Image: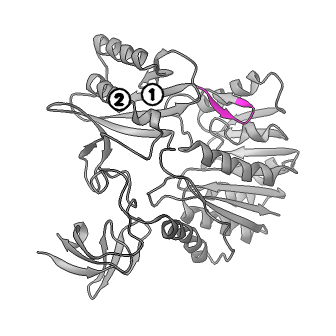
Amino acid sequence: MNQTLAINYIGRQGDGIAETPQGPVFVPFTLPGETVTVSGIAEKLLLEHVEQPSSDRQDPICRHFGICGGCQLQHFAKAPYLQWKQGLVADALAREGIDIPLQPIIAFGAHLRRRVVFTAIRGPKGSLLGFSQRGSNKITDLSQCPVMLPQIEAALDAFRQLGALLSPKKGTMKLSVVACENGLDVAAGNGTITPEPSRQQAISIAVQHGFARLSLNGETMIELSRPIINCGRAKVTPPPETFVQAVAGAEDAMAALVTGHLEPAKSVADLFSGFGAFALRLAENSTVLAVESNGAALAALEKAWRDTGGGLKATTTLKRDLYRNPLVADELKKTGGVVFDPPRAGALEQVQELAKSKVPLIAAVSCNPVSLARDLRVLIDGGYKLQSVTPLDQFVFTPHVEAVALLSR
């Protein structure tokens, strides 16, 4: 049975929320001030019609919007959308009692996503390739995606061919794609043994389309050219499926904030360093200790540093699980600055040690405002002053928002 609802505000996951006598009701693809007709039960309401649209509503730019689960907010006009995203960071800080004016959000538009993780599955008429639909394990078979870089979008059919060859007979396969400086780095993960004829056909597709590298379950199948990602003066070849910032411009913007803040430090530590997106840039000015639990990422960092031929200052790597074994205050005695960029869970164990330290300068990078605010609260209570917080809209049309916070002792 259909019902009519008035949307009051947008929740943290991007759904419009209607306040009803029975409590809040979540309606996807709606905006504050709208009157809408919905169907279904409270947990899975479907938007049937927008009776009274908001002046902030715009036409989506993708034909798959509303079905594909990749984007949630293409219907939201840019200015109020960015204001809402900035509010996600401000609200998270406020819940921890942190009151600071935010820097203007740094925005990135469509056609910029350089890292994409597709799901592929065998269908009755071939392979389906795309993203999971909202609240479902069904896959939207993509014919376009205006969020990603054009060179990735142009290769959708080639990725679909790889899915038909490499996907398991039952279950799904992940296909990770990174647009590097010299071509696409494509990594398939199917968790099974693939027949040799299928492997050879997949290699032929990679050659035909000029992929820089094709790997399967972490094993390089063919490398036409060493995939390169620029990190300042250094050129990194990331291991297959290693984390890469989704938008190159966002990485550059975050790195500029971090390196600018830590510039006075003669020695710095990059915690959760990955393959060195920050460490290699910081090494242009300071000696660096890069700490990371992924040995392959550290090896890529070390090679990139060596390949500069002495163009960077001394950089040391340390393989260490900073959740189980964080750097303690005594280990940071001679460190002039620290940057940490942890997964979404944040870095509570590590910041508790940082709060006891005398490190003069800290830069915190986060993809989760809630865990960032919690970690900042620990540092502030430990005697650090929060100087600035800058939000970044790296994942356009989604509720995800990044932020860089700069602190001093």
- Which residue has dot 2 on it? 159
Q: Which image quadrant for residue 119?
A: top left
Write the residue at 35% across / 18% down.
202
Q: Nearer the viewer, residue 4 or 121?
A: 4
**Residue 186 badge:** 1
- Residue 383 at what x, y percent from top left? 79, 69
**Residue 116 badge:** none
Of the image marks 1 and 2, the number of the one nearer the N terminus: 2
In screen coordinates, is 293 left or right of 361?
left
The kind of residue tagged 1 is Val
Q: Is residue 326 visible?
A: no
Disc 1 crowd, CA 10 A, few/some/many (<14, 14-19, 20+): many
Name above or below for residue 194 compared with residue 269.
Answer: above
In screen coordinates, is 262 left or right of 178?
right
Write the residue at 45% across / 27% down.
186
Do the CB atoms of the residues marked 1 and 2 lie less than 8 Å apart?
yes
